[in-house]
Amino acid sequence: MSRQRLTIGTFGDIGFLTSANGRVVARARYRDWDGKNRLVQATGDTQRAAELALKAKLAERSLFQPGGSALTPDSPFPDLVAYWLEDLELEDRLSKTTLQLYERNMRTLVLPAFEHLTLREIGVARCDHFLKQLAKLSYNRAKQARVVLRLALGLAVRHEVLPRNPMDHVSRLRRPASTPNALTPAEVNAIRAAIAYWEAGRSPSGPKPDGQLGAIVEVMLGTSARIGEVLAIRRRDIDVTSPVPSIRINGTIVTHRGEPVQRQDHPKTAKSRRTVAIPSFTAEAVRRRLTRLEGTLLDALLFCNREGTPLTTNNVRRQLRHVLDLAEISGVTPHMFRRTVATAINEQAGVDLAAELLGHTDPKTTIQHYIRRNEMVNPVTAEMLDRVFKKAS
């Protein structure tokens, strides 16, 4: 007569062995949620202690109920990563750029610390320690690692491989105190002068000028657009003949792994689409650039290489770094022009208009990341104090 099959989630008779060191081993067959019987064991100083340890282990094991995937709590973490990336592609909700970013962050930041662990071994304490150690090196890296680790473990919970997401209970990451920096008008003019010097062919070294960097900077200053958005502007997006010249921001340049650089038909977010009235210095730079473009195709890019294909943001950054060395200005990136514009508009008209120009739906984002704090207190305080404390004549 065959032995009666265990019901899924239950265990059979407990047996005991005494190891060479005198400790007692309690063990029993357990039928996991995938239908397979597995030997589970625990040790203790006495038979009673070993039995209690085994039952605690079995009770914990019964909480894990794998869904339709082949994953179990004893699966290696890399198996979950592969399953998670496949699920993201099937979901088809994220852009290719975001998918590649998630994959890179998981591969470079998270996997080195978790690749030799099973899912069961990844708890709150381990995740918390990992993020704190990474945050000591870089807050941004810790933040990016937290995102992908939470998403992957969250999938394991949704598919009933794990009972809870340990990332739900890790300590909050504390962003280091920082103040957004912006260029002064004098620094902007110094950069303009350095670009003119370089584009005139006076610099004996560095990349060869193609006559576009100056206009790119003027467009960034006149629109607050990101560098990728500026490089994605087409002839059809420009109106410099109306009484109020404008540029439509409705795309960006992206580079996907293994593919040539290409124009994406929306900016960083769909809500970032906007039409921006441009100042005279930007309109003048755009008009000069338009006269140099060959052909009349409306989809022709305002800034492009000789073949008419998009410039890479990395190439523009390389040119800018060379120019900044000439101007003896350090620490400037294309994104600083965006913060410079936000700071100037905030000082002239307030944060709401600055947020609208940058395409932000929440002015808090503009304040926190883009506006340099004005340290000058309103001078009206001097007049007030004069009236109260002025010395009698």
Image (spheres, rainbow, N blue to C red):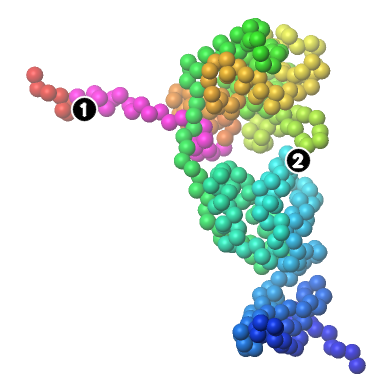
Q: Residue at x 56, y 57 (%)?
A: 129
Amino acid bearing label 2: Lys
Residue with the most extreme bottom position? 1
Instruction: Answer with left or right where residue 380 lies relative to residue 239.
Output: left
Position of residue 199 relative to residue 262, above or below, is above
The question of residue 370 being in magenta is answered with yes
Query: Residue 374's image quarter?
Result: top left
User: Mark 1 packing: few (<14 Cα in 10 Å), some, or many (20+)?
Assistant: few
- Residue span colored magenta: 361-386
Residue 22 position (above or below residue 374) = below
**Residue 72 picture location, percent across and down:** 76, 67
Q: Secondary structure at mark 1?
A: helix
The residue that mark 2 highlights is 96
What secondary structure is found at the residue carrying circle 2?
Answer: helix
Q: CA distance from mark 1 to mark 2?
A: 60 Å
Q: Quadrant of the C terminus?
A: top left
Against 68, residue 30 (above or below) is: below
Residue 233 image offset from top left, x and y in percent: 70, 22
Residue 324 image-quadrant placement: top right
Depth check: give the residue in front, 119 or 277: 119
Q: Amino acid at mark 1?
A: Leu
Identify the mark at residue 238; answer none if there is no mark.
none
Q: Is residue 98 above or below residue 111?
A: above
Q: Is residue 163 visible?
A: yes
Percent position of residue 118, x then y: 71, 63
Which label belongs to residue 385? Answer: 1
